[in-house]
Structures are given as C-alpha cells and as structure tokens.
Amino acid sequence: MHVMIMILQPCLLRARLVKFTFVASAVLCVVSPPIASAETRHFSMTIDDTIIKLVDKQTFHTFSFNGQTPGPLIHVQEGDDVEIDVDNQTTLPHTIHWHGMFQRGSWKNDGVPDTTQPAIPPGETFTYRFKAEPSGTMWYHCHVNVNEHVAMRGMWGPLIVDPKDPPPAEKEVTKDYIMMFSSWASAWAKKPGYGGVPGDVSDFFTINGKSFPDTQPVRVKQGDVIRIRLIGAGDELHSLHIHGHDFEVYAKDGRPLANPYLADTILFGPGERYDLILRADNPGIWMVHDHIDKHTVNGSKPMGGMMTTIEYEEIPVKDQAFYKWKNKEFVPDFYYEESMKKPFGMYDNPAFKGDPAP
C-alpha cells in the first residue's frame, strides 16, 4: 500500500504541474495583446493631368495622383507587403519614390529614374512592391524632374505606417491630422513641363493644396489629445506656430524622439516630417500659421497662404461676429482625420479633387 502511494504521488504531482501549466498558459493567452500578422495590401493609382484650385480664382495645372492634390492617403501597418499599380495617364514620364521606406531587398522599387528603374512612360503601368518598414509618418512623391513635379505640380501624398506595437504616447491620441506644406509659382501655373528653375518666385503657399481662407479649421473638444503630422512637401522652409498652446515634438521623420520636447513653434524643411502631440486644454479659437511671413500671402494679397485655426467645440463660432470663418461650411477629412480612423487601406479625398486638364 505504501509503495502504491509513493508511486502515485509523483504522478499526481506531474498531473498538477501539467494542469497548472495549462491554466497559466491560458491566462497568458487572454491577457497578452494580440499581435497582428502582416498582410499583402494591393492598391491602384493613376497619374493624371489635373487642374486644381489653390484659392479664389488661382488654378494650377498639376500631375496629380487619382485626380487630387495631395494624393490619396495610403495607411498600412508595419511589416505589410505593399503592391501598388501606377498607371501614367499624362503626357510626361514619372516615377514614385516611397520616401522613408527602407526597401530592404527591394531597392529597384525605390522609384528613382535611371537609378532604380526607367521612368514610367505615358500610357504605361508599373507595379511597385515593398515591405512597409519602418513605421511612422512617411510620404510619396514623383522623382522625375522633382524641381517641377514635386515643387510645383502637386505630385505628393501621405504614406502612414502604423507600428505593430504603438508606444503609450500614441495610444493616448484621440484625433490624427496630416498637414502637407507646399509653395507655388503662379508664373508657371498653366505651363506643365516648365518651371522649377532658379529665380522662380513662389507667391502662393498651401496646406494640403489650399491657401487660406480655403483651408479648413482643426476642430477639437477640450480633453482631446491630437497628433499633427507635418510634411514638408515643397522646396521651402516653414516655421509653424500654434497660438494658445505648446505641443510635444514627438517624432522626427517617422522615428519617436528619445527626448521629446515642448515648443510652440517648429522649423522644418523640404522632405522633413515632424509629429506633434497637442493636448487640447485651452478652449477658444486659435490661429495656426507659418511664421515665415511671406508664406501668409495669396499673390500680392496679405492674410492668406499657410493659415488655419483650431476651433474648440465649446466655443460657438457663429456667435463671434469678428471671426472670418463664423459662417464657413465645414469640410470634414481636410486633414485626413476621418480617413485615419478607417481600416488600413488607400483612401481618395473628395476635398482635394480637381478637374481633368483640357
């Protein structure tokens, strides 16, 4: 009998250990956050001759993506395999550079003519394939004759790559805004294939392809934590100032900073991206503008260009008789804030659509 008990005890102990291990594993499976697997995401876009309106009667002939400037939002997750068919429907050659992507093992998809590929001829299609890495605020743009096609033909759009495991600061964000800054020389507005040469004078300045007062307010409510992704899409420096708040400079060129810092003005140049995190804690109507003063004109007219406002829901704007935008028709998603809430994908934006060029 004693022998049998001695034999059974180790067996029972092993059984308890197996049971404990199973239960512990089950608990770990419940509390551990799911890790999303990489997916293949296939998109299609066209390059079109398009007429867009910057402000008032000022139009511009662009080579747009899907008929809009900025181009459609491409929003994917870190590690995704991305395939994009690009159909060139213009009369000039183009490529697309995926600015910020490492292109590990896919260097021929970097989009540089005569270096990684031949330019896409008019009427032809090219398929880009790459892995979405690293994560962060990136962008895409043409790499043919960049001094014209990027600097003044609107060939750019946002590419946002979400991290697989977002840091705590990003999990706090309640609204996500994208602002692309660019300048335009109206002397070349109706002359595609020309311009972007030394001596050009930029006289129109836009956020997401529009000049004030045709931009849109950033609408928030007290307590929001907003992320503003700044992208220097043109060829000039900008100095963004936000009234009534400071913000945390959180990331540079897609990478979170080791030591984020507070500021109320930030300088950024061509190709640079900065992510700002702002806590909406001061209800009011607050100006947001480029502090390089010549960037706040429309041609020869002051009080235009790179300007917008932050509007708090707690402030009845229609009651402010002096407010220029008190009766403005609000256009949502002007900063891609609604598209950023959607599942991963590519999203056109009606607010940026132009008309086919004659």
Image (cartoon, grey):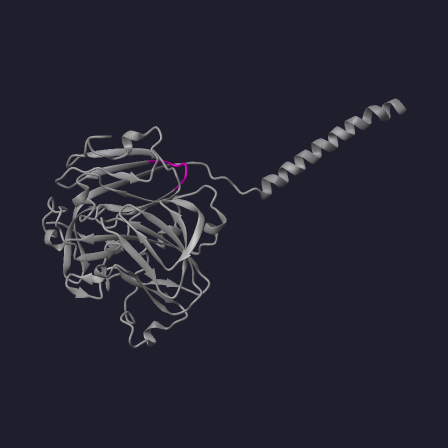
Residue at 32%, 56% (x, y): give it. 333
**Which quadrant of the structure image shows residue 332?**
bottom left
Residue 81 falls within the magenta-colored stretch: yes
- Asked whether residue 30 is drawn in magenta, I would say no
Q: Quadrant of residue 245?
A: bottom left
Residue lying at 10% horizontally and 54% vertically, measured from the top left: 187
| Residue placed most toward the observer, 182 or 25 | 182
Residue sitting at x 87%, y 22%: 3
Horizontal side of 156 relative to 356 (left or right) equals right
Q: Nearer the viewer, residue 352 or 148?
A: 148
The answer to whether residue 251 of the structure is visible from this angle is yes
Spot occupied by residue 61 in the image (x, y as percentages of width and height): 14, 50
Residue 1 visible to the viewer: no
Nearest the eye: 93 or 86: 93
State the extent of the magenta-drawn residues as a range: 77-82
Toward the right, the furthest residue is 1
Q: Position of residue 48 (x, y in %)?
A: 18, 45
